[in-house]
Amino acid sequence: MTRSPRTIAARRARENAAAFAEREAKLLTLAEKFFSLEASSPAAKIEDEIEALENKLATLREKLVTAQAETQQSLAAPVAEMKALKVSKDEIAARLGITRAEVTALLRISAKADAEPESE
């Protein structure tokens, strides 16, 4: 009994479709394996650690800005007291080992702090 060309074509189509589906399933499995290995690789773990440390560093930099502002305010008081004793900016700078520009900046900070009413 010979098969009709339609029957043969249908059988071939089913075989080709099954082979295609099997190949696609294997490709999907291999892609999942690839991404799983990539995510759990030592390099990925180091990248995650770097990201965590960069976030921590950003937080510390924000804290540093606040701490520097507080430090400048506390350093401004003795400089202002020296200036109140009629010591020149050059002498204040020489005594403290800072520049004249830094003395001027600290005096501005002190003047600004004196001008602001204390909020307590």
Image (cartoon, helix red, strand yellow):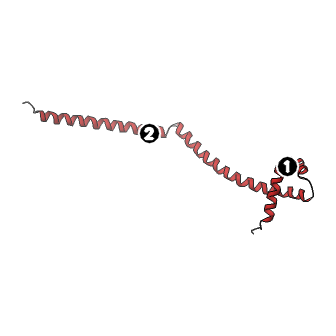
Image coords of residue 69 (percent x, y):
74, 55
Write the residue at 84% across / 47% down: 99
Q: Is residue 12 above or below residue 107?
A: above
Give the distance between the C-alpha atoms of the residues marked 2 and 1, in whole angstroms. 60 Å
- Left or right of 115? Residue 95 is right
Write the residue at 74% across / 52% down: 68
Q: Is residue 57 above or below residue 38?
A: below
Of badges 2 and 1, the one in the foreground is 1
The front one of 101 and 35 is 101
Tell me the SS state at disc 1.
helix
Image coords of residue 40 (percent x, y):
49, 39
Write the residue at 61% across / 45% down: 54
- Left or right of 88? Residue 111 is left
Amino acid beneath label 2:
Phe
Q: Quadrant of residue 29?
A: top left
Q: Quadrant of residue 74?
A: bottom right
- Left or right of 27? Residue 4 is left
Tag 2–tag 1 contact (CB < 8 Å): no
Image coords of residue 49 (percent x, y):
58, 43
Residue farthest toward the bottom in the current orientation of the protein:
120
Amino acid beneath label 1:
Arg
Residue farthest toward the right in the current orientation of the protein:
86
Could you classify mark 2 by the number of other residues whose Cα lies within 10 Å: few (under 14), some (14-19), or many (20 or more)?
A: few
The residue wearing badge 2 is: 35
Q: Quadrant of residue 66?
A: bottom right
The residue wearing badge 1 is: 100
Q: Quadrant of the C terminus?
A: bottom right
Number of numbered callouts drawn = 2
- Left or right of 40? Residue 78 is right
